[in-house]
Image (tube, rainbow, N blue to C red):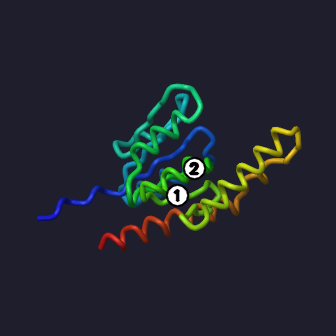
Amino acid sequence: MTEPRKPIEIFIDADACPVKDEIYKVAQRYGLKTWVVSNAFMMIPASPMIARVIVDAGPDVADDWIAERAQAGDVVVTNDIPLADRSLKNGAHVLGANGRPFTPDSIGSALAQRAIMEQLRSTGEVTGGPKPFDRNDRSRFLQALDEVINRERRRRG
């Protein structure tokens, strides 16, 4: 007899996530447990399927919590490239808040670009940062989240 498969769960690296409300709506539509992980209290919808996790302040504490729990087939939403890498190694699907998927094929170049940008900033170079988040990013994210959940559901049969 095979063991029942763990349901898909969503993990949100929530401190700077601009698409939490969109995630809540999609998760509710599919009945998925959602973990909202942050260093500080934040409001979440009253639902037994949404859990707030407040971790201690400190570098990578929220990332560690997520990386230790996200498993194959789960969805991690983060813009943190090292967390994306760790989550991919666990077999999770990873999306940036702008809808860009992190994949095993793309994570190496993302890590390299991050290292280059850190090096530039450490020399005092002004790098400008990411472009402002807009309506198109939000729409792209919603579409990507829906696609990744449906792809995982089909894969599971």
Q: Disc 2 designates what residue?
A: 78
Place of residue 139 in the rendered image (x, y in percent of width and height, measured from the top left): 63, 63
Place of residue 61 in the rendered image (x, y in percent of width and height, measured from the top left): 52, 33
Q: Are marks 2 and 1 in contact (CB under 8 Å)?
A: yes
Q: Secondary structure at mark 1?
A: strand
Kind of residue indicated by mark 1 = Val
Which label is found at residue 36? none
The residue at the point 58 percent across, 63 percent down is 101
Quadrant containing the N terminus is bottom left
State how many labels appear.
Answer: 2
Place of residue 126 in the rendered image (x, y in percent of width and height, measured from the top left): 88, 43
Residue occupying the far left of the picture: 1
Closer to the chain start, of discs 2 and 1, is 2
What separation in Å lies between label 2 and label 1 (alpha carbons)? 7 Å
Q: Secondary structure at mark 2?
A: loop
Quadrant containing the C terminus is bottom left
Q: Is residue 132 left or right of residue 140?
A: right
Residue occupying the far right of the picture: 125
Residue nearest the observer in this picture, 48 or 104: 104
Picture quadrant of residue 121: top right
Kind of residue indicated by mark 2 = Thr
The residue at the point 16 percent across, 64 percent down is 2
Residue density around tag 1, few if under 14, some if 14–19, many if 20 or more, within 10 Å: many
Place of residue 154 in the rendered image (x, y in percent of width and height, measured from the top left): 36, 73
Picture quadrant of residue 5: bottom left
Q: Disc 1 designates what residue?
A: 94
Q: Is residue 43 left or right of residue 34?
A: right
Picture quadrant of residue 112: bottom right
Q: Is residue 129 left or right of residue 6?
A: right
The residue at the point 67 percent across, 61 percent down is 109
The residue at the point 52 percent across, 62 percent down is 145
